[in-house]
Amino acid sequence: MENLNDKIATLQKWVDECSSIVFFGGAGVSTESGIPDFRSVDGLYNQKYDWPPEEILSHTFFMNNPVEFYRFYRDKMLCLDAKPNAAHKKLAELEAAGKLTSVVTQNIDGLHQAAGSKRVWELHGSVLRNYCMSCGKSYTAEDILQSSGVPRCTCGGMIKPDVVLYEEGLDSRVMNGAVRDISRADMLIIGGTSLAVYPAAGLIRYYRGRRLVLINKSATPYDSHADLLIAGPIGKIFSQIHV
């Protein structure tokens, strides 16, 4: 049974040998920056609201009850003071060094770009982008945070965050880019995700390489498929990798 140090040494060796790594990440990448995870013990799914979070964050709820949607959204989804952690920073370093092709993320917080990553496929969109549903005018996350009630455009139209709500489809350009990069990767590192959210989790099926690394605090349905399985917080593990 390999210990943690041996596993990190193996990860380091593979990073040294590879030149087209893709990182696929979920909520666990951002929890170390103070952003709550939906499904963890103290995550959003275990807090009490009048409606479950997955209902509030649905397209139907947004359209039918935008006041309550935005009350929850401002309170729980806009973590604008969060800063990139060791995982975000290491991935940006790997990209700058020509090792990492891209980051594929289920997160909507923009922390990968804040850390310096250039090629980021945001499967579920970003809270940093918002647009008027009538005229298309763009608004910042600060605009949303500082507004009250339902944010309105200067034209009077309702503003919507550029995030993929439940019942909405993923952006085909983003999906195609993620699939292309994953299918060409010589190493796929999956980190901080339960691999429970589809269609995003299904993307790893496109990986054809022989170095599938899975880093997560808890077990996932794909643990048995991993060539290297590391249990633990991703920022702590990545901080030990040298570029």
Image: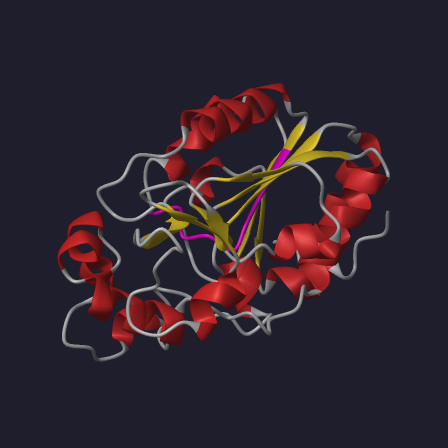
Residue drawn at point x = 79 percent, y = 43 percent: 94
Of 131 and 114, nearer the camera is: 131
Quadrant for the N terminus in the image: bottom right
Determine the residue positioned at 27% across, 75% down: 46
Residue sitting nearer the eye, 60 or 12: 60
> From what the image shows, is residue 36 above or below residue 5?
below
Q: Is residue 107 visible?
A: no
Q: Is residue 194 magenta?
A: yes
Q: Image height check: is 70 above or below 191? A: below
Out of 126 and 91, give the one closest to the viewer. Answer: 126
Q: Position of residue 40 (x, y in %)?
A: 38, 69
Nearest the eye: 178 or 152: 152
Residue at x-position 57% and y-position 27%: 182
Q: Looking at the image, what colour scheme do you see?
A: secondary structure
Q: Which residues are the magenta region?
A: 188-196
- Number of callouts: 0
Where residue 186 appears, as percent x and y from the top left, is: 68, 25
Q: Residue at x 72, y 56 (%)?
A: 115
Give the image location of residue 30, x and y in percent: 55, 63
Q: Is residue 233 left or right of residue 218?
A: right
Q: Check residue 162 for magenta coloring.
A: no
